[in-house]
Image: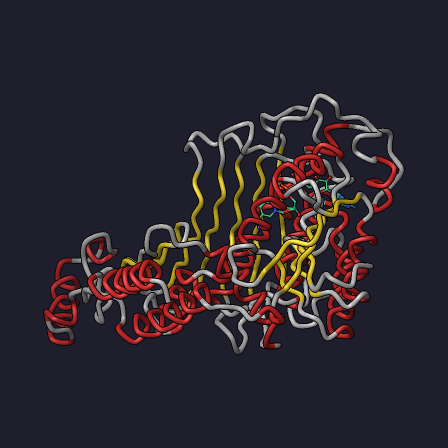
Amino acid sequence: MKKDSLNSRRKFLQQIGATSFALGAAPFVSLALSEKAEERMLHYERRVAPNDKIRIGVIGYGVQGHFDLDTALKVPGVELAGICDLYNGRLENAKELHGKDLFTTVNYKELLDRKDIDAVLICTTDCWHARITIDALAKGKHVYCEKPMVFRLSEGHPVIAAAQKSGKVLQVGSQRVSSIGYAKARDLLAAGEIGSLNMVNAVYDRQSSIGAWEYTIPPDADALTTHWDTFIEATQKMAFDAKKFFWWRAFKEVGTGVAGDLFVHLLSGTHFITGSKGPESIYSTGQLSYWKDGRNMPDVMSGVMQYPDCKEHRAFQLTLQVNFISGTGGQEIIRLVGSEGVMEVRDNDIFVKHSLMPEAPGFGGYDSVFTFPKRMQQQLQQEYDARWTAAQRKAPRKEDVVFRVPDGYDEHLDHFTGFFDAVRTGKPVTEDAVFGFRAAGPALACNESYFNKKIMKWDPVAMR
Ligand SMILES: NC(=O)c1ccc[n+]([C@@H]2O[C@H](COP(=O)([O-])OP(=O)(O)OC[C@H]3O[C@@H](n4cnc5c(N)ncnc54)[C@H](O)[C@@H]3O)[C@@H](O)[C@H]2O)c1
């Protein structure tokens, strides 16, 4: 092993250990995390035998396709074999970045036909996810598919069935579920750190044109350069519209709005931390406040979900909020509220504050007792004093817990490491098709609730 990488590994492990011990987190969790971190570092530094290489193809080489590919290539033994995209400019960009001999195509089936490709990353517009995933699995490819796993609720079960039938790995791309911060949150919740969970408030606010999905549209965009006729094969026939191709999230014909883009991340994170299979009722409301650029999806949206009492957790409520014109300047938080404290997840860092109730019930102060006759007040006071000691009247105190991941920590890389491990060893991934649909289903049901103005019933076990 090279000296540099040994040093970086030591440094990383020291950071992990120091962060969690010094800030008072439960030692057993810290130990587990250090072990996990060490295991991961060993993975990053592992030498891979030539016959253990994994060759990948990328389908959809837009913004996330670039991030996913760059991250995947950091995992030892992963090689790029080809890129597919519908917009010519992105195929040109692919050759600029990866060499003029790179195999590129506008027809994803040509990638799937290649024998030298083991796995594909599906990073297309949402409306293509299910179709390409099913085709890729049928061709014997392992699949990393971006979130939301599906575009329509009706596509969930066919994708799950295709994954099961193929025996290949399918991992969905909500990378936060592979974060050591989220693992910490899950362990703290299970250890009772905030008492019994009863509410989750999940927020994803932004205040910028890019945040509201108004990405730069290339000047040569037209029906030919974007292969528009192919693009709309997965949806309805429509005249070319550059916004529907490049700002697809904002249009219900091709995208899934804030629900499929962002609620799904909040749901994946919440399900991972709580171990939940999902809610049983879903309501959503929204409005178009500011980004009146032709879009037909709201830019301010909230969802309320009721999670049932079940073996994984007690009943709790989840509120989801996205505000694209938020004077907060933007914020992203998952806040888990329990009977004894609050746990906030910000990026990959975890902050726990406690508030415990005294054993004795309240008496006096803002209480009805002062409205009673004097003699009754005195008698009640005496009874209270005889029944409860001073200690029982005081709220117990508990130290805050702060867990910060080391600088430079990348959960996206962990998510890909898990994916390629599964490809190599057959061990399960964190976010398989069932997990993926348990997050995407309730998110998409928010759009149905919003458009149809009704409460949606969801069976979290059967996923219907
Ligand atoms: N995990 C995350 O944090 C995260 C972040 C951003 C986006 N995403 C997801 O990644 C996906 C892509 O998002 P983006 O921001 O990169 O969008 P984008 O518009 O930048 O890129 C999408 C690309 O897919 C291509 N495409 C569409 N249909 C295709 C087809 N049939 N065959 C080949 N290429 C096709 C388009 O030409 C385009 O270049 C979406 O599903 C999105 O939800 C995930």
Q: Would residue 184 appear left or right of 433 to someone viewing this image? A: left
Q: Quadrant of the C terminus?
A: bottom right
> At which x and y percent is residue 99?
65, 42
Question: From what the image shows, is residue 358 above or below residue 311?
Answer: above
Q: Say whether residue 401 is visible.
A: no
Q: Would residue 228 appear left or right of 376 to someone viewing this image? A: right
Q: Quadrant of the N terminus?
A: bottom left
Question: From what the image shows, is residue 224 above or below residue 312?
Answer: above
Q: Quadrant of ligand 1?
A: top right
Determine which quarter of the picture holds residue 368. bottom left
Q: Would residue 181 appear left or right of 54 to someone viewing this image? A: left
Determine which quarter of the picture holds residue 237. top right
Residue at coordinates 46% horizontally, 68% vertically from top-left?
46
> At which x and y percent is residue 247?
68, 33
Residue at coordinates 52% horizontally, 44% vertically from top-left?
321
> At which x and y percent is residue 25?
26, 66
> At which x and y percent is residue 323?
52, 36
Residue at coordinates 55% horizontally, 52% vertically from top-left?
265
The number of callouts visible is: 0
Question: From what the image shows, is residue 294 above or below residue 433?
Answer: above
Colour convention of the picture: secondary structure
Foreground: 102 or 440? 102
Q: Say whether residue 3 is visible.
A: yes
Foreground: 434 or 106? 106
Residue at coordinates 43% horizontally, 48% vertically from top-left?
333
Foreground: 364 or 336? 336
